[in-house]
Amino acid sequence: MISLEARGLAGTRARLDTGAREFPGVGERAVRRISILMRKKLVDRMSARGAQHPFWGRQAPWGIAYLGARSGQSRARLSPGGVVFKHGNEFRSAVGSPDRHVAFLEKGGTIMGRQFLRIPTRASQTPGGSDRNAGRSIRAIPGAFLLRLRTGSLWAARVVGGKSGVRAAAAAGATRFGPRSGSKLEFLYLLRRSVRLRGRGIFKLTAGEVNDAAPALAQIEVSRFVKQVNG
C-alpha cells in the first residue's frame, strides 16, 4: 500500500487565512505609496529655478509644466501625501491645492482686477520675487505716483535720487528727469485691467507620470505581502 502524507497544512492554512484578512491592506499601502510620490513630484515641479530679468525681476522657469518658487507658501499648502480613504471596495488618495491662483496656473484663464492688477517690476520685488508691497495701496508707497506713457500703458513709478524738489515735481505730474537733476524714474508696477495666463498643466502631467509608475509601486507591496504569507 502506497500512501502520501502531507505535513504542515495547518500552518499553511493559517497563513492563508491571515493573508485573506490582511490582503486589503496591500491596496491601501500601495495607494499611500503612490500618493506620497505624487506630492513629491508636485513639490519638485513647483520648486523650479526661474530666470532673473534686469527690469521684470524673477520670471517663470523655462518649460510649461513648472513653477518658480517664491515664498514657498503655495507648496506648503498642498494637501499632504499618504492620506488614504476607502470608497466602497476601493482605496483612494488625492493631492491638491486650495489656492485659486494655482488653479489658474494649471488650466489657464483671464484674471480680472477690481480696478487694476499690479504687475511688479524688479524694483518692487523681494529677493525671492514676491511683491514687497503686497497688501499696501500705491498711495501708501512713499513717493509713488501714476504715469501713463504715450503707448497708453499705465504705470506706478517714483523718482529716486536728486533733490526733494524733483520728487515734488514728480508727484505733480512732471515726467522729465535726467542727469542735471541727479535723479531717475523708477518703474514699480505695470497696471492692467486683466491678465491672461497660459495653462501649465502641472497636476495633469504629474498624474500621468504617477499613473505610469503605479503598477510597479503596487507590485512592491504585493511582493512584500506574498513573502509575508509564505513565511
Image (spheres, grey):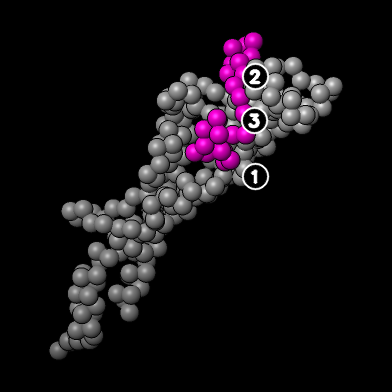
* Viewer-proximal residue among 119 and 6: 119
Badge 1 amino acid: Pro
**Residue indicated by mark 2:** 172
Quarter of image, res 36: bottom left
Left or right: 192 in relation to 96? right
Residue 48, horizontal then vertical, whole percent? 58, 44
Q: Which mark is residue 117?
A: none
Q: Secondary structure at mark 1?
A: loop
Reply above or below: 197 against 103.
above
- Between the residue at mark 3 and the residue at mark 1, the CA separation in whole angstroms equals 22 Å
* Of pointers 2 and 3, the one earlier in the residue sequence: 3
Left or right: 95 in relation to 202? left
Q: Would residue 212 be seen by someone viewing this image from the given angle?
A: no
Badge 2: few (under 14), some or many (20 or more) residues near its Cα, within 10 Å?
few
Q: Main secondary structure of the magenta part?
A: loop
**Residue indicated by mark 1:** 127
Badge 2 amino acid: Ala
* Viewer-proximal residue among 97 and 214: 97
Question: Which quadrant, please, contains the N terminus?
Answer: bottom left
Residue 125, horizontal then vertical, whole percent? 62, 38
Badge 3 amino acid: Gly
Q: Residue furthest right?
A: 180
Left or right: 107 in relation to 151? left
* Of pointers 1 and 2, the one earlier in the residue sequence: 1
**What's the residue at 19%, 84% (across, down)?**
10
**Residue indicated by mark 3:** 143
Q: Secondary structure at mark 3?
A: loop
- Between the residue at mark 1 and the residue at mark 2, the CA separation in whole angstroms equals 31 Å
- Between the residue at mark 2 and the residue at mark 3, the CA separation in whole angstroms equals 11 Å
Residue 47, horizontal then vertical, whole percent? 55, 47
Badge 1: few (under 14), some or many (20 or more) residues near its Cα, within 10 Å?
few
